[in-house]
Image: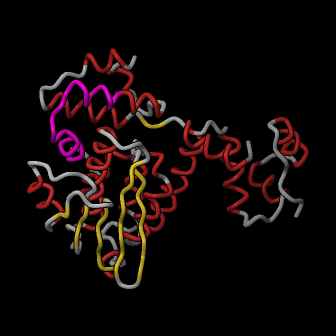
Amino acid sequence: MDKNNNYESAIYHALRPALGLLVLCQALDELALDTDAVLVATHLTRDFLETPGALIRREQEIAFIEHVLASNPRADLAFRVGLRYHYGAFGVWGLALTSSENLIQAFEVAHEFIELTHSFAGLELKLDGDIATVEVHADYPAGPVRNFVIERDLVITLIIAAEAAGRRLPVIDVEISLPRPDYAAELERMAGVQIQWAAEHTRAHIHREELLKPLPQANPITWSACVRQCRDLIAQQHGERPFEIRLRQLIAESHFAGIKVVCRRLGVSERTLRRQLRDEGHSAPGAG
């Protein structure tokens, strides 16, 4: 298998935050729906899901959602689950969004670090002249789980974008690749426009100038610190060692000035660094 395939496999099999399942359980509790049978069937416990920083495998989360949808066939479940979210629920990822300079930067951060959420949906921003397109696409085969993910994550996107901007976004139109539900009016009130249902894509169009407006909580220092933490968390979810994470940061921060600069920052000798890298199967940075 080549390096690219190894990388893609690592992403696919990386551990994921258990937050999504915890929020789903909380929504089921609120709606007086059963969670115990689903937890038993998927070999998970409520205590585990409530543990800060708990991680699960992708297949565990998919199986959990499948069991929930099979045993609790409530049509508006994805919508109700999505309403429970706000940017604070996502920790450093959410803070990175709200402290961004504008919504374009926020969408870029959301896309780059989407693995820090429990989302199976990709968030893509396309800029074409004066009109921007924000598209949600689910990384899951067609079926109940995919429909659940698309609807839930669309609601979350609308909520968090509005929180970051301090206002509801004045979208031009919204398309959703799902049939029109009985509660469509609630979603349309949230979006502020009539929705085109059963569309080919799930996306919204908005004037580019709206995305360039400064965000009320923009803070470049906070944003930079959050982005660094997001990169660390992603690396840890992929099983990388803290030393590897710190080393990559220092190399980047030193503008690739060479191993002597990195050693000074780490407080180790060049010989020690080279030996540790060799032991872990890496090569040392250039000798600059």
| Magenta-tinted stretch | 64-83
Instruction: Identify the image quadrant of the C terminus.
Output: bottom right
Report the residue at 26% width, 16% height from top.
37
Q: Which of 188 and 227 is in front in this view?
A: 188
* Residue 220 drawn at (x, y percent): 46, 68
Residue 162 is drawn in which quadrant? bottom left
Instruction: Identify the image quadrant of the N terminus.
Output: top right
Residue 79 within the magenta-colored segment of the rendering: yes
Q: Which of 227 and 114 is in front in this view?
A: 114
Report the residue at 42% width, 54% height from top.
122
* Residue 41 drawn at (x, y percent): 34, 16
Report the residue at 36% width, 36% height from top.
19
Q: How many labels does the image show?
A: 0
Using the image, determine if residue 279 lies above or below residue 205.
Answer: above
Q: Is residue 185 left or right of residue 1?
A: left
Q: Is residue 197 left or right of residue 212?
A: left
**Of all residues shown, which one is farthest toward the bottom?**
129
Q: Which of 238 and 286 is in front in this view?
A: 238
Report the residue at 39% width, 60% height from top.
97
Residue 207 is drawn in which quadrant? bottom left
Residue 195 within the magenta-colored segment of the rendering: no
Q: Overall secondary structure of the magenta stretch?
A: helix
* Residue 155 drawn at (x, y percent): 24, 53
Using the image, determine if residue 218 lies above or below residue 17.
Answer: below
* Residue 267 drawn at (x, y percent): 78, 48
Q: Is residue 53 left or right of residue 158?
A: right
Using the image, determine if residue 164 lies above or below residue 84.
Answer: below
Using the image, determine if residue 243 lies above or below residue 197.
Answer: above
